[in-house]
Image: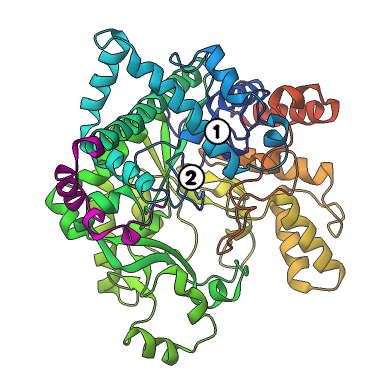
Amino acid sequence: MYLSPDQPLAGILAPLFALRSEDDLGIGDTAALREFVDWAAENNFRLVQLLPINETGNDNSPYNAISSVAIDPCSLAISPETIPDLSEEAYREVLNGFPLSELRDGPVKYRLVKPLKRRLLEVAFAKFMEGPKNTVRPRKFRAWLKEHSAWIEGYSLFRALMDENGGTEMWDTWPESQQTLQNAQEWLTVQKEEVQKRLELKMRFFQYVQWIAFEQWREVKVYCDSKGVALMGDVPIGVSYYSSDVFCNPEIFNLRWSGGAPPETFFKTDPFTEKWGQNWGVPLYRWDVLRQTNFAWWRQRVRAVREIFHLFRIDHILGFYRMYSFPWRPKRNAEFTYLTQEQAQAITGGDLPHFTPRDDTTQEHRDANRRDGEEYLRALLEEAGEYRLVGEDLGVVPDYVRPSLGSLGIAGFKIPQWEHQPDQRIVPGEDYTRLSVVTYATHDHVPLATIWDDLAAAAQKGDKQAKWDLDQFCDYGGFGIDRIKPITHPIHEALLSALFQSNSWLAIVMITDVFCEKTRFNVPGAVADSNWSERVNATPAQWGKDKTRAAKMQRIAELIEASGRA
């Protein structure tokens, strides 16, 4: 699928876990995604954006993955139709007596979903291992292992050791002999034969799961091709401290510092975030070490994404230029929340959160940061080839970053309510650069309906800033109706129309904003069961049977067509 900014597209963002299908197992999967792609195509959306699909740890955050390459098994459609090694009888036997209606109702119940999907995959794997070894499927499996040899062996050992250590990915709590790939491999060679065979079988199981996952996602990509819908993936700037990547390649990470984002007035979710910023806990990269291998680790990530997606977004692309860094891990955040800078320095030995490798306070620093970022991103672009990159460049953005991304051909983001002219009036959508992505909200933001209603409520109480912000929205949307009231269908339609009519290459609407709902998928800085678990309220087929929703979608499809994005 050839994608060019010469052809503007309308897209829709939906976390995979949030999608529903009639037969899902309590979480969105590749089967649900196919149905969603059908629905998107029918309504003139020619791009579907997902959050990262990498395997998550026990916090279930797609932005804290335990592997930069491995796919989360929860994303798989697991049935006799989707996994050849799973018989109808075996499938029904595992599900017999399981409360599927409870599993499918409400948000994702990871404590039930993960063990259920794993059990089904174990049954399929056992059947696969019982079969003859020189038929088509085993040969395909061996070929896939050879193709992915750079990462699959270390990852599968890491996953097997997680099982050996109570299911935790926190490798620094494991026995010292197992805390790095080299140590673990040496430890394994001196174990009894029965232990070696048991662990090797587990490793083969995790390799089998990844093979199934990559096969399913490759098929989804082909399906999207047939529907004329581009699939956009997401590559986070970092990986989890507790990941197979750190376990296998500790030399490329600086584990003393934790990456994150500086304080922003927009996010007021908790006192720590407001005062110190977001401490994501991801280790920093040792770019000097990565350079010695021509950035092989990053190239590997890009190759894996290319197999599955037509283009991909890099989350927090600013981190390639400089990363806001904390001298403590997130588990210590509460300890620092109410301290002064002097008190914090007394604990850390003089260190405070700051930009690494250098801040942007001098022209020399800015020039150096730009050179570094462009060097690293050129390596990714070289590996991506004809595949397009999109850079999430939101937050505290240095003035050199967007020109730099433009010079590399990487589209950045436009959030209309944040784009202002020198006189502080909102920038009209027609003035956006073509090489950009426009959206009202990402997965980290409150939905459009919430933004509007909160501003309207504040304006009703006399808040002048809220009234001014509403005026800006109305200027962008090109309408002059009474602003100080909750969002209505005409307001919603006008705002979507303005988004589609902008000059940006991609105009993307979050699934909640399509239906003008207030469901939120993530609250930055917060640790809650509601994060990464909320689901849409029906399947695409059910949306089509709902007369109100069907009429709304017909109107949105017309707006997209009128904008030239269909």
Mark identifier at residue 48: none
Give the mark count: 2
Sequence-wise, the earlier of marks 2 and 1 is 1
Residue located 37% across and 52% down the image: 239
Image marks 2 and 1: residues in contact by CB distance under 8 Å? no
Q: Residue 193 or 29: which is nearer the viewer?
A: 193
Q: Is residue 8 visible from the viewing direction of this image?
A: no
Q: Is most of the magenta stretch helix, strand or loop?
A: helix
Instruction: Decide: is 279 above or below 344.
Output: above
State which region is magenta.
167-195
Quarter of the image with the N terminus in it: top left
Asked where in the image residue 240 lies, by quadrant, the reply is bottom left
Task: Find out whether residue 157 is within the magenta segment.
Answer: no
Q: Is residue 525 visible from the viewing direction of this image?
A: yes
User: Outermost residue, top direction?
Assistant: 135
Mark identifier at residue 436: 2
Task: Find out whether residue 186 is within the magenta segment.
Answer: yes
Circle 2: residue type: Ser
Residue located 16% across and 53% down the image: 291
Which residue has dot 1 on it? Answer: 116
Mark 1, residues whose alpha carbon is within 10 Å: few (<14), some, or many (≥20)? some
Instruction: Decide: is 557 above or below 481.
Output: above
- Judged from the image, the secondary structure of the residue bearing numbered disc 1 is helix
Residue located 28% across and 58% down the image: 175
Task: Give left or right: position of 431 versus 253.
Answer: right
Mark 2, residues whose alpha carbon is within 10 Å: few (<14), some, or many (≥20)? many
- Judged from the image, the secondary structure of the residue bearing numbered disc 2 is strand
